[in-house]
Amino acid sequence: MTRTLPVRSILLSLLAVTALAGASHAASPLAQPTAMPPGMPAPKDVAFPGVIKLHVDATDLQRRIFRVRETVPVEGGKRITLLYPMWLPGHHSPTAPLADVAGLTVKADGQRVEWTRDPVTVSAFHITPPKGAKSIEVEFQFVSATERDQGRIVMTPEMLNLQWDSVSLYPAGYFTRRIPVEASVTLPAGWSFGTAMETASQAGATTQFKTTPYETLVDSPMFAGRFFKRLDLDPGAAVPVHMNVVADRPEALEIKPDQLKAHQALVQQAYKLFNSRHYDHYDFLLSVTDRMSGIGLEHHRSSEDGVGDDYFTDWDKTVPYRDLLPHEFTHSWNGKFRRPADLFTPNYDVPMRNSLLWVYEGQTQYWGYVLGARSGLISKAQALDAIALTAAVYDNTPGRAWKSLLDTTNDPIVNQRRPVPWRSWQRSEDYYSEGELIWLDADTLIRERSGGKRSLDDFAKGFFGVDDGSYADLPYAFEDVVKALNAVEPYDWASFLRTRLDGHGPGVPLDGVARGGYRLVYRDAPSDYQKQLLAMRKGQDFTFSLGFAVGREDTLSAVIWDSPAFKAGLTLGTRLIAVNGIAYDADRLKEDVTKAKTARAPLELLVKNGDHYRMVSIPYYDGLRYPHLEKVGTGEASLDAILTPRP
């Protein structure tokens, strides 16, 4: 039986305990942090002593494993630190697949040498070779993804994407441009490949490449496959350009003459825009596949481009793919030759800063659509439809109220490119497409102020077209961009840019659309371009009406913050079951949205979220709304001129 103490006794006991705790606390020192270990050796612009030999066996197609053997010159008895590349150009964040490195072993003169992972820089491996050792043998496997939820699929029974940064370690303490590497690869028998790397020799299925700096190696990936075709995009040119295509099946490689002509025109239109070449040869690496993961990644002398299996065979239905190659090709000038100063790093484990991605990616996004239209990869009408969709999306992005465009340049680091629940409110890498609108604005302003005598084309020639033939990086800062714009057309460009980079709306500035001779309007049917985009995504878009998009299995793939859907409590991942008492059907929902304009009756939706079903009511009466550009006036507008091929 528990004995009850008087209240006074309880209080006295508590006071005594508190006093004892205080005395104990006073007697014990507060915890202090453990000292951090020494940092990594700072990279120096000095030559690495020796040549690294790197071999990759890429023949294990069924298990999708790359087997790596690397010989690294060392000084016996002296610790060396090997790094796995984490901060890679074009990724804008430390997103390398370090977790897929497995089976790491090190030997010197046939004897095993233990390695120690750095407790802070976990991509660093410390190794102390025995005295007298002149090199170490490093072996590991890159166990690439076997399912898409594990990461990018980079190997299938038909093709592979070899990125040298994924399958190599490099020594700390040196600029990557000062580390020479002899690389080789063994591919499945009978396969062909495309790469910007230059071949030294071939023996059977093994290719040995010429010795090259590690920086160039990482910047020169490979596409290889069972079904392969190499196309000349600039026949007879002193500086060759090729498109290397791998596909799931041989039929997908069949390219019609007019399709080839458009890709060849892309090269010529780019030369007319930039008036220079900053490479001795260029290779588009194009995967036409539904099995290997897609990609769009720029390099100085090549690009990795991934499109669907139907890119050539269903040409009239793949328009939304076709700004990809113009975008990545533009990066050879904007992003590789000319690179923001705070994005240039001496090696791949020094953090990058993204403050100028609105130039690096935003202007490249702009030129992607412009060159797409000028080359005939997309029509002028399709380019206008794409611009309309971009303008509408950012004009209806409520997140601009709290988060500036400039701050979105940090999103690759902050979010690591993961999906987010409230994209329109959180924002995510909007420096691409909202940045595109800034450069449309600048282009039309230059044209207006100069009476059509000058344009952003002149900026491209003056800023990116310098030092023709040079491969060296040429960094730039904000002030350099402003100076180059003023050289084309004197204006307060610093304020122009700051207003758009730091502003909060409401709505996105659409001056470029207006000066271009068009206005953004909404109609009750999507454009042909948007229809193709929705078909490719297997979805439906009610973004500008109800405030949501529908993806696979009738599940909401996006919900706009503060929209009618948001106010009804709908979220990403909610499944539509019924509308107004009848099983959900996209066409029926469109009809009901249209009827609500006159009936003035709310839509009643039965939805499922997890194991929970509920009814929601959406009082929306403004009908279906899809964005279009409507021409103002007659004759050729400024935007028409921008999209017209250069003679």
Image (spheres, grey):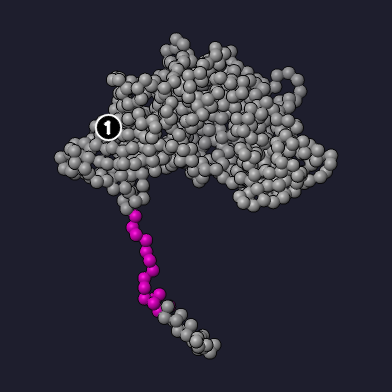
Q: Please state the extent of the stretch shown in magenta in the rendering.
A: 22-36
Q: Quadrant of residue 445?
A: top right
SS at mark 1 in the image? strand
Question: Is 32 included in the stretch rendered in magenta?
Answer: yes
Direction from residue 85 to residue 71 in the image, left or right: left
* Residue farthest along the left direction in this orientation: 132
User: Which residue type carries mark 1?
Assistant: Ile
Q: Neighbour class for label 1 at 10 Å: few (<14), some, many (≥20)?
A: many
Q: Quadrant of residue 226?
A: top left
Q: Where in the figure is residue 175, as x and y percent of width and height?
A: 33, 36
Nearer the observer, 444 or 18:
18
Nearer the observer, 92 or 476:
92
Q: Does residue 90 appear in the picture of this structure?
A: yes
Q: Where in the figure is residue 382, as x and y percent of width and height?
A: 65, 24
Secondary structure mostly seen in magenta is loop
Quadrant into which the C terminus falls: top right
Q: Where in the figure is residue 487, as x and y percent of width and height?
A: 55, 26
Residue picked out by circle 1: 52
Direction from residue 496 to residue 325 in the image, left or right: left
Q: Where in the figure is residue 8, as x and y percent of width and height?
A: 53, 89
* Residue farthest along the top direction in this orientation: 236
- Rendered residue at 31%/38% (across/down): 140
Nearer the observer, 476 or 504:
504
- Rendered residue at 36%/44% (across/down): 123
The answer to whether residue 24 is above or below residue 373 is below
The answer to whether residue 502 is above or below residue 387 is below
- Rendered residue at 65%/37% (across/down): 393
Question: Is 425 included in the stretch rendered in magenta?
Answer: no
Q: Does residue 502 appear in the picture of this structure?
A: no
- Rendered residue at 63%/18% (across/down): 644
